[in-house]
Image (cartoon, grey):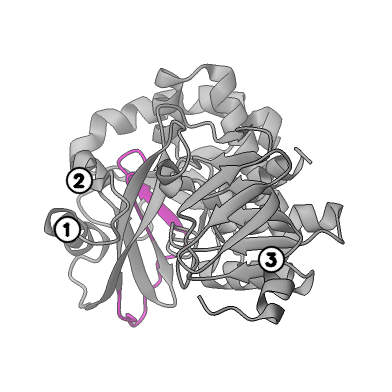
Amino acid sequence: MNLSYWEIKTWLTNVDYTVVGSGIVGLSTALQLKIKEPNAKIVVVEKGLFPQGSSTKNAGFTCFGSLSEILNDLETHTTNDVVELVDQRYKGLQLLRTTLGDAALSYQQLGGFELFLDKDKPLFEICSQKMSEVNQLLKPIFKADVFSNVSNKFKFSKIQNQYICNQFEGQIDTGNMMQELIRKVQTLGVIILNNTKVEAYIEHLNKVSIQTPHFEFSSQKLIFTTNGFAKQLINENVQPARAQVLITKPIENLDIKGTFHLDCGYYYFRNIDNRILLGGGRHLDIKTETTTKLAQTEKIQQSLENLLKYTILPERDYEIDHRWSGIMGVGSQKKPIVKQLSNHVYCGVRMGGMGVAIGSLIGKEVSDFF
C-alpha cells in the first residue's frame, strides 16, 4: 500500500496495544486500557466496515439466561459455575449501563418472557417446578426472585397459557450502543482502522509484528477479541455459531412489549420500532450453522417465518422487510476465555451468545492483565 510518512507516523508507529476486533469486547478493552493509561497509543483493527461478529447484529437483549437455559446449563456445568456465569452477565450489564448511560443505550427494563409451545408442555412443567430452586440460587445476586409465572397477556398462539417472566431483563438499541462506544473510545484518542484484516502475526522479544493485506506494523501488545472468528488466528476452544435474523416492516398497533425467548433460548424476538425482530433456530442445523459465513438458509428462515405466522402474529398482516445473520463464539463450556497466550499476546473470546451482557466486563478483565 502506498503509505505516506504521515500515515505511518500518525497511525502505525509506537503502538502500545493493538486490539483485533471492534465489537463490544474489543472497544471495551480499548476503553479500559485508555482509562488506565491515558498516554498509551491504542489501535483497534477491524476486518469489516462494521464489526463483523454480532455486536451490531444482535437483537439488543440485556439478558442473562432464560429459566430453561439456566436449567440446561445446570446439567452440564457445576452449580457454582452457573451462578458465577449469571453473576458475570449481570455485572457486565451494570458496567455497560454505567459506562454508556441508559439514555445512550435507549435502555428499557420491560421484562423478559419465556414462551413454551404446545409441544413443550413437559419442559414448561419442569421449569415451573424448578423455578423456586433457581430463584434461591440467584437471590444473592438480585436480592429478589427473578422468575415468576404470568398469563398470556400478548395473546400469542399455540403456546402454554402462561409465560415465565424475568423481571430484571431489559432491552437496548444495539446501533446506539455501538455508536456511543465508538464515540467514547475515539474521544479518548483510540485509533480504529476498519477494513483491516489481521492475516498473521510474529512475536519477537519485545514486540509483535502484525501483518494485514495493506501494511505491516508492530505493537508492544496484541489482544484478540474476535470471538466467533478467533479460530482463524488462535488455537482456543471456541467455535463460530451463526445466528439468523429477520425483521418485519412497521406494524400498526403492535402492543407487544418486552423481550421473548423460546426453546431454551434458541429462538428470541422483540418489538423494535413497531417491528418484530425475530432470530434463532440454529439448533435445527448445528453443523451448517457452525460457520463464519454471513448468510441465510431456507431451512432456518422458514422456521422463523412459521413461528412468526402461527405463534407471534397469528391473524395479523405483516411483511418481512430484511434478513441478516451474525456470528457468535461458543464452546464446550460457556465460561469466556480470558487469558495470556504468550509473552505479548492475549485474548478475550467465547461470549457464548451473551456478548451484550458480558462484553463490557470481559473487556475490563482483559485490561487487568496490564
Residue nearest the observer in this picture, 248 or 27: 27
Task: Return the mark for residue 297.
Answer: 1
Numbered disc 1: secondary structure: loop
Q: Give the range drawn in magenta.
A: 248-269
Residue 357 lies, with reference to residue 335, above or below; the image says below
Q: Assign the magenta stretch its main secondary structure.
A: loop
Disc nearest the viewer among 2 and 3: 2
- Residue plotted at (34% across, 83% down): 252
Q: Is mark 3 on a helix, strand or loop?
A: helix
Q: Residue at x 60, y 73 (%)?
A: 179
Placement of 292 over or under 368, stated as above or below: below
Q: In the image, residue 42 lies at what x, y percent?
A: 72, 60
Q: Nearer the viewer, residue 64 or 150?
A: 64
> Which sits in the foreground, 5 or 298?
5
- For the question of whether residue 74 can be seen, the reply is yes
Q: Mark 2 points at which residue?
A: 288
Query: Horizontal placement of 234 versus 346: left or right?
Result: left
Q: Earlier in the sequence, mark 2 or mark 1?
A: 2
Q: What element carries label 2?
A: helix
Q: How crowded is mark 1: few (under 14 residues within 10 Å), some or many (20 or more)?
A: few
What is the three-letter code of the residue carrying label 1?
Thr
Crowd band around label 3 with a 10 angstrom C-alpha radius: few (<14), some (14–19), many (20+) = some
Q: Are marks 2 and 1 in contact (CB under 8 Å)?
A: yes
Q: Residue 296: x percent and y percent? A: 22, 61
Q: Which residue is labeled 3 in the image?
A: 102
Write the residue at 13% across / 54% down: 299
Q: Inspect the image, locate mark 3, and give the three-letter code of the amino acid beneath it.
A: Asp
